[in-house]
Amino acid sequence: MNSEDQIKLEKYWKENCKEYLYKFPEQFDPKWLVMESGWPFFRLSALDDQPWKEMYAEAESLIDKFHVHRDEYGKGWRSLTLHGLNEDTQTLDSYGDRQETIKQLDWTWVAEKCPVTKKFLTDVWPAEYLNRVRFMLLEPGGYILPHQDRADEEKRLSVCNISLNNPEGCEFVMKDQGRVPFDDNGSAFLMDISNVHSVWNRSDKPRLHMIIHYELGRRVRDFFYVLRQSYYTNRG
Amino acid sequence: MFLDKVITPIEANVKDWNSISVDRYYEDINVDVEVAVGILDISRDIPNTFLAKRTYDKTFFYVNRMLKMKMCTYVGFHKSVDKILECALQTNKKYCMIACQGLLMYRGPSLLQQSIQYAKKNPQFFVVGHIMDKKKQHYLTTGSYPGLHRQYLFVNVQTWKNLGKPTFNEIGVFQDRKPEMQNYELSEETIHSDYTPAWIRKAEGSTKYSVIADGSNWIDAACRNNITIENLDNDMRACKVFLYPYIDSDKLAEVWNNKDTHKIDKLTNQSQKAWMRKLSYQEEIEKDRVYAFNTETLSGEGVRTDGKLIDHLFSAAAGFKPIAILEANGFHSGTTVHYFDWCQASLDYKKHLLETWDGYDLDKWLLENDLKYNFSSTYRGNYKKFWEQELKDFGGSLAFQRLWDRYRKLTHEFYVIDIVNESAKLMDKINNVHGTKVLWTTNIWSSEMLNWNVEPEQLEKHWLAFKDAIPSDLVLYGHDYMAVDMNESVRNKNSVKHISYKNNWSKLQ
């Protein structure tokens, strides 16, 4: 790591690495939760019993196949696409006509090598359509500098980030919000990526996550069911 | 003649929208050849587990009444409309009634009859349901294509098949894959609100929608095939209530048994509030409610004592059914009538009637004593009409009066007994006498309020304890806890068991 990045990350961590405190309303309201709560991330606890370890093993077995990802603002960040245009699919808007791109989306060879992960995505994940789904690798010592994937005015919980592992010393921190409490044993979070965020793997192990971009379609109620189960679990 | 089966057309019945009891004259309307009924499992959407179970129990309770009347065939509790329709197809039914968990069809027989009448008049119809055009009302369906509320659907199974068995889609939101839907025309006439048009039909062209509602694709399919879908009319709507168990679930669960009026008033859904207020009122008035006539679905009838005269009749203190049982089987001057009821007022009324009424013009006697007793609202204000019906059943005024004279002279005993919770007390009385003994329990075991307050599994335990204590020489009239004639379920071993609730949503698919 160059010293400039080191200073930037240390300052960012010092200012933002804290615990995020939720205030849960008495009544669960899915629209409020997703669109209006302002919550930067939300754990989908209803999915806690998924076979994350098996999915981790599937991703780890392909670790030498990952492609370098966004090295302009990070180091040691790699990805491998399960569902998309090919094993190295970039953001869908980068391919021209989005509608044409959407029509071409399909499972890649990676999904065929990862049956447990694919079964989760087809049978459990509560959305009718998958857009881009990727394994994300952050190597030991790797980092992603603070960045923002969506404009400030587009605040909402959307993309799902799943920790297949999250070694101690590896942290995902959102500016002004706090640290996302990913679980090393596996955990799924809806994220509001309009928040500036950064990841730093200060462990000696690779960190493997999965990111799901999706379209709910006709499975709104299934999605709400997962949200509701999670809401009451998280609230305690 | 009383023992003849009486099937009176709906129009001839007195509608009592204030009562939750069913109409008496629907006994044995046999339209089973054509209709399947299934319950749509929406447990996934009901946060409160108690409420999920109890709403299923109650929906099944009303379905069971129709089954018992042989009006339809039950095809199960399923997570999708499609599965229910497939089951209907497999059982070769022409029509399928889909009742959502939480739908209380307290006048189910009437609803079914009206639905079948509609089907006969419109043989090519696809579905009758609640057409919802809530694009301005609900945040989830803002800008949505119209849909069909899943609480109640009456489907022409053949048309569904002809249309390619379209899945009944749920609410959907789309960004990249907006479905293209057939344009539509809505009636100007609405049923009760501006979002409930009387019908929907095809218009030219199609439009992409980013939001669709439940059943939008059925409307789309109907429009594409030039089929008009009609809404339920107000008479159909008045046969049922939907509890919207996914709204204020915890609050509704809290008032389910303890019907605290202050808490009921805090419910935000008007259907829930109105129904719970009605039940609360019903529970309050039933404490001293008096049944001058038998307005429940009539229990099994017929001669059951093999030609032996009745020596002892053990009877619920309600209406004139005990006299009819005595007349049908025969009795003698030494016959004793043992009245039991959990309510002292019902016993007091019986005593009073026996002591002071001469057997003529009951309507006038009831009017004179109208304020003394808490008579059921079903016939309050309609005494004359109900009395005339009763006389018709008994063969006219003279025939009844002669019977009443004989009946009055018998020995009458009165006991306050709650047969559900204190069945041993009643059995002690029965076992202490000898001769030809008859028991009539009316619909106590299958009554609405009992089934609301006691879970069917618990009620089944009470019933089995009662059943086990029934002596072998006791002649039985009345319903068991599943509304099956006790003679059938106990003596002929044709009992039916409640189908217990099972949560099928532990996994999403």
Image (tube, coloured by chain):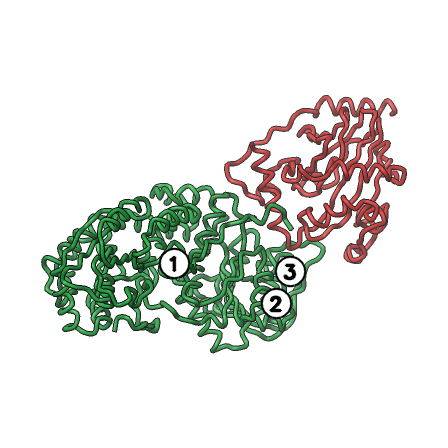
Chain colours: A red, B green
Q: Residue at x 24, y 71 (%)?
A: B393
Which residue is more in the foreground, A44 or A23? A44
Q: Chain of mark 1?
A: B
Helix, strand or loop at label 1? It is loop
Please state if B107 lies on the left or on the right of A1 as rendered.
left
Q: How many marks?
A: 3
Distance between the alpha carbons at the discs numbered 3 and 1: 48 Å
- Chain label for disc 2: B
The residue carrying mark 1 is B483
CA distance separating discs 1 and 2: 41 Å
Q: Nearer the viewer, mark 3 or mark 1?
A: 1
Q: Earlier in the sequence, mark 1 or mark 2?
A: 2
- Asked if the residue under mark 2 is in contact with the one under mark 3, i.e. CB atoms within 8 Å, the reply is no
> What's the mark number on residue B220?
2
Q: Distance of mark 3 from mark 2, alpha carbons?
A: 12 Å
Q: Amino acid at mark 3?
A: Tyr
Are callouts 3 and 2 both on one chain? yes
Q: Position of residue B260 (x, y in %)?
A: 34, 42
Left or right position of B133 against B273: right
Q: Which residue is mark 3?
A: B209
- Label 3: which secondary element: loop
Q: Are marks 3 and 1 in contact (CB under 8 Å)?
A: no
Q: Is residue A162 above or below residue B324?
A: above
Which residue lies most toward the right here? A64
Q: Which is more toward the observer, B48 or B78?
A: B78
Image coordinates of residue A52 in percent, x first then y, are 73, 37
Name the residue: 32% across, 57% down.
B443
Q: Quadrant of the N terminus of chain B?
A: bottom left
